[in-house]
Image (cartoon, rainbow, N blue to C red):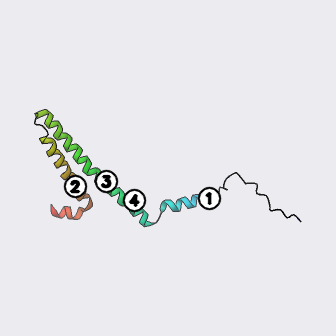
Amino acid sequence: MNSQAPRDDRAGRGPVRQPEKLANRLAGALSGPRQTRDTWRGLGDAWTAVSYILSGIAVWGGAGWLLDRWLSTGPVLLVIGILVGNFAGVYLVYIRTFPKEASRAS
């Protein structure tokens, strides 16, 4: 009788790959529970809001800076442009977040 344990020919070559099981696990992980998808959607909405506000500040602030240089008025129009851009960005976020309330208000 042979008292030795059976020899594993795979020793040292890494794990056994089973592509069908891996594909099933990946599909389950990518679809994820609803809570995970809602979290990522919420993060996307947050980044959209941030980009609206920063874009408004950049565009209107840039317009104010150009007008300041053209009219030689100093940083007055730059500051006004930054404030207008900030308010415009917040307004766009409000319209996107609460479309029914925004349509009733106008």
Q: Position of residue 98 (x, y in %)?
A: 24, 62
**Mark 2 = which residue?**
90
Q: Quadrant of the C terminus?
A: bottom left
Secondary structure under badge 4? helix
Are the residues at dot 2 and dot 3 in contact (C-beta closer than 8 Å)?
no
The answer for how far apart the CA atoms under marks 1 and 2 are is 48 Å
Residue at 18% x, 40% y: name it: 63
Which is more N-terminal, label 1 or label 3?
Answer: 1
Which is more N-terminal, label 2 or label 1?
Answer: 1
At label 1, which amino acid type do we have? Glu
At label 3, which amino acid type do we have? Thr
In the picture as drawn, the residue positioned furthest to the right comes out as 1
**Mark 1 = which residue?**
20
Would you identify the image quadrant in which residue 22 lies? Answer: bottom right
The answer for how far apart the CA atoms under marks 3 and 1 are is 38 Å
Would you identify the image quadrant in which residue 64 lies? Answer: top left
Q: Is residue 73 above or below residue 15?
A: above
Q: Is residue 45 left or right of residue 3?
A: left
Q: Is residue 92 above or below residue 105?
A: above
